[in-house]
Image: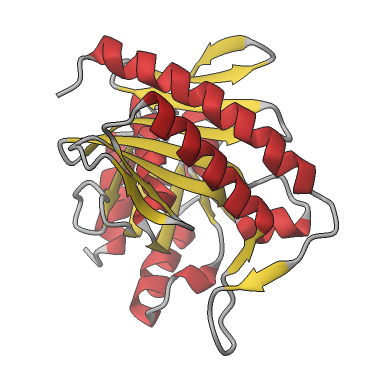
Amino acid sequence: MQSISDVDEHLETARQIVEEAGGIALSYFRQPLKVENKLKGNLFDPVTQADREVEAYIRGKLSAFFSADTIIGEEEGTSGGGGDRCWVIDPIDGTRAFISGVPAWGILLGLIDNNRCIGGIMHQPYLGETFVGSDTGAWMIHNNDRIPLQSCQKVRLGQARLYCTHPDMFQQPADLESFQRVARASCLMRYGGDCYSYCLLALGQIDLVIEGSLQPYDILPLIPIIEGAGGIVTDIRGNPPMEGGLVIAAANEALHAKALALVQGN
């Protein structure tokens, strides 16, 4: 088990690595770029050279600084020392936004220990914003300023601003209907955002994010950012979303309880 001071020290090293990798991503952003599809048929899961180079850079640096740790990445799988502590990389979360020139994508890095995500980073290099979360809280680094994050603690469901990247994330009709029940009860619903939506929740700009079919690397790095800002994020059963799937992130516990009940059909 890591001490709080150790975790924040490791996260500061990791933040510097991720921000360095942001320069690689920016060199490809809004430039002519070959896009490959990892899926067959009519399904589309894009990957680019930017994804691969960003992950390779982060993986190499983490291996040098934390040689005993396991490293899991979206593009290159598992490597590292095989220790209990694990780093999870999503080199470009929101590749569809990336290849469309929309700055809603981000570089994600999470730190897992004892089956719990104890630290998380999201870096958006085009906007120059880095979001960090741990048990000590959550903060944004922008223009060298460290800005504490606080989600909206008093917002109710009828006032809530709800986001989801795309309705196609809900592969089962019942899941889409569950989302739509919450949308009908909310004040505002918008599509788009990818990982950036979760950080806007931590920043107090939106109040709910509900998405389906997430992979662990899509959500694990974002958990400490949301929780460190006072929010809550779970799966459809109300448990930590360690395996991804259908995820509900809310600005406060009361709002989460209302949204979760609607998603569950209660």
Q: Is residue 44 left or right of residue 183?
A: right
Residue depicted at 62% across the width and 57% down the height: 95
Instruction: Say above or below: 235 vs 200.
Output: below
In the foreground, 157 or 60: 60
Instruction: Say above or below: 8 vs 121.
Output: above
> Can residue 229 be seen from the camera position used here?
no
In the foreground, 136 or 113: 113
Q: Quadrant of the N terminus?
A: top left
Residue depicted at 69% across the width and 39% down the height: 24
Q: Position of residue 219 (x, y in %)?
A: 39, 48
Q: Is residue 151 left or right of residue 262?
A: right
Q: Is residue 145 left or right of residue 31?
A: left
Residue depicted at 27% across the width and 54% down the height: 235
Q: Position of residue 120 (x, y in %)?
A: 40, 32
Residue depicted at 45% across the width and 67% down the height: 180
Q: How many marks?
A: 0
